[in-house]
Amino acid sequence: MTKSSLLYASLVLNLLFILAGLFALHRYGGWRNLWSKINNRGIEKSYFHRKNLFEMLTPKEGAIVFLGNSLTAGNEWAEMLNNPNILNRGIPGDHCDGISARLDEVLKNRPSKIFLMAGVNDLAFYPPSKVFPKYERLVEAILAKSPQTKLYLQSILPVNNIVSPTPVDNDDIRTLNEDIRKLAAKKGLIFIDLYPLLLDLDGNLDAAYTSDGIHLNGAAYLKWTEAIKNEVGR
């Protein structure tokens, strides 16, 4: 076999290997699903651990609840806001349906306020048009089950896919944020637009506030806290 024949055969085999890989990737949920599995190893066990722990805790009547996913879970809200009546009910990896499924535990505290941030994990798998109905059902469930609670809808935060690739893009985030803004107006709720707070000049999450393109450091939480402290204290 000539060198050119060997080269041709090698190229064909490599192409077949690439095609097989792409087919497998598509078959098992696409690159977004692969990214999620790689970056969320062990998160399911952690999720159920935190959910079970929350269910075991004694209710705190009239608590101020921060509700959401890892972005909410990552801050010490009670200490940052110097308010022992605050409960952090963020769970890494959570999504709109997951939060809906654990509302009973959250609402047993008869919260005076809920600061909700949800949807970014949903956007890793679905377009905004499919995520928003899930978000809306979550909001309606809170309002129906806990009408005495003052509900705040916080916008989803930007990401930075240059610092590190994420399965979410800012165009989808902005679209969903606009839907959330309109929902707040429709329901007479307070919308807190945090999206512009952490942007860089290129419209991405500022690299000064993240090491992985999506999760936040202490400096970012300080800015977030400053933006909402008046609403928490009202």
Image (cartoon, helix red, strand yellow):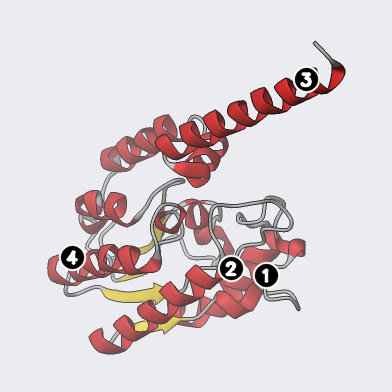
The residue lying at 43 percent from left, 59 percent from top is 123
In the picture shown, does residue 1 fall above or below 187?
A: above
Instruction: Kindly identify which residue carries mark 1.
Output: 204
Local packing at callout 3 (Cα closer than 10 Å; few below 14, some 14-19, many 20+) is: few
Judged from the image, the secondary structure of the residue bearing numbered disc 2 is: loop
Local packing at callout 1 (Cα closer than 10 Å; few below 14, some 14-19, many 20+) is: many
Q: Are marks 2 and 4 in contact (CB under 8 Å)?
A: no
Instruction: Kindly identify which residue carries mark 3.
Output: 5
In the picture shown, does residue 10 fall above or below 50?
A: above
Can you see residue 226? yes
Identify the disc placed on residue 158: 2
Q: Nearer the viewer, residue 136 or 13?
A: 13
Instruction: Kindly identify which residue carries mark 4.
Output: 141
Q: Where is residue 48 in the image (x, y as percent from the top left)?
A: 35, 34
Identify the disc placed on residue 43: none
Judged from the image, the secondary structure of the residue bearing numbered disc 1 is: loop
Q: What residue type is labelled 3?
A: Ser
Q: Where is residue 202 in the image (x, y as percent from the top left)?
A: 73, 76
Q: Which of marks 2 and 3 is nearer the N terminus?
A: 3
The residue lying at 25 percent from left, 49 percent from top is 102
